[in-house]
Image (cartoon, rainbow, N blue to C red):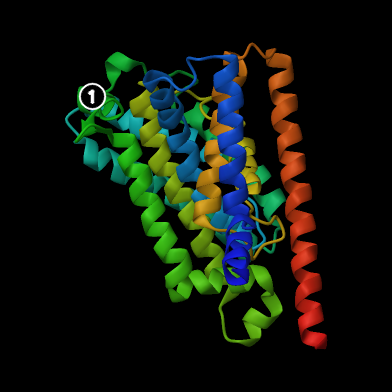
Amino acid sequence: MDKKKFNLKKITGTREMSLVIILIVLSIFIQARNNTFMSITNINDLVTNAVMMGILAVGMMCVLLIGGIDISIGSTIAFSGMSVALLLRAHPEIPTFISFILGIVVGTLCGLLVGLIITKGKVIPIIATLGLMNVYRGATYLIANNQWVAAYQLPEGLKSFATGSVLGINNMILVAVFIYIVFAYFIKFTRTGRKIYAVGSNAEAAEISGINIDRIKILVYSIMGGLSGLVSILWLSKYASAQGDAATGLEIDIIAACVIGGVSLNGGKGTVLGVILGTVTLGILNNALPLINISPFWQDAIKGLVIILAIIINTTSQRSIDRKNLKRREL
């Protein structure tokens, strides 16, 4: 009996299970205020809108795990998307699959530049990504000559990807699920994944143990750029246009999703499952607040409050874990 109680306490005490409980309570509350919330149409809209945020959040988790940050991803999405859109406008015969590869390549190069500036230039991440955020955004306007690529200038195959499905499941959801599975395995079961955690937990100890910290940082920022490039093509498909101001400010929601999901801003702590749940939580807030007639002026304030509470919970939880570990060492 005691063993069962202990196991139940252990399960319900995890960060992920706490988020699941919060999501259930939040959904019930919103459904009571507006019965269209749990409708098939609204759930489909909620999930498809959260897909791109979820893919980016997985990449941001890797960045945060090493104790870094990347606020240039919105600009990377805009630059990658515009680069590919201009190419497609000139050569509409390019297959959709190649469009995705091109977007990922451009995004990866953008992320690689971020990683090189941080590691070789010894620039702190917030400054490096702040500078490149403006560089990439400016470059987007320059290559497009301050214009935008309209829907009629994009291939039909690309535009139909976001609305297409396989076995009744939307293509964008399938892409996100694939990314989640790959990264859940990569971050937990591969040697490189363990190195990412090690760098964020204790960089000095990681270096002493033989881990090339600069190489890990460059890899992580390149991954973040590659996922931004992938999302840039999904963005083109979903919104059927490329604009210079695309994805402006998106990085704030991505970081928020990670924090809500239990990823530590100090590095070394976080899971893919937590990030998925954090993304769903933020997606529900973005979807539900207008449904229950919350003023637009209050929506950002409420999301900000949720982020602050998540940070407080994360900090308190980490301190509790540190105290328990300290007691065990003393024993």
Residue 184 placed where, x, y %? 43, 60
In the picture, which quadrant includes the C terminus? bottom right
**What's the amino acid at mark 1?**
Pro
Extreme residue in the front direction:
1
Secondary structure beneath label 1: loop
Residue nearest the viewer, comparing 113 with 223: 223
Q: Which residue is mark 1?
A: 155
Q: Quadrant of residue 103?
A: top left
Mark 1, Cα crowd under 10 Å, few <14 / some 14-19 / many 20+, is many
Q: Quadrant of residue 239?
A: top left
Q: Residue at x 77, y 73 (%)?
A: 324
In the picture, which quadrant includes the N terminus? bottom right
Q: Is residue 196 left or right of residue 104?
A: right
Q: Residue at x 63, y 67 (%)?
A: 6
Residue 177 placed where, x, y %? 36, 46
Residue 71 shows up from this direction: no
Q: Is residue 118 left or right of residue 74?
A: right
Q: Total label count?
A: 1
Q: Quadrant of residue 65?
A: bottom right
Residue nearest the viewer, comparing 312 with 130: 312
Residue 114 placed where, x, y %? 57, 54
- Give the answer, above or below, for where 155 lies relative to 169: above
Q: Residue at x 26, y 30 (%)?
A: 161
- Give the answer, above or below, for where 321 lies relative to 114: below
Residue 273 shows up from this direction: yes
Residue 82 placed where, x, y %? 41, 30
Q: Residue at x 64, y 66 (%)?
A: 268
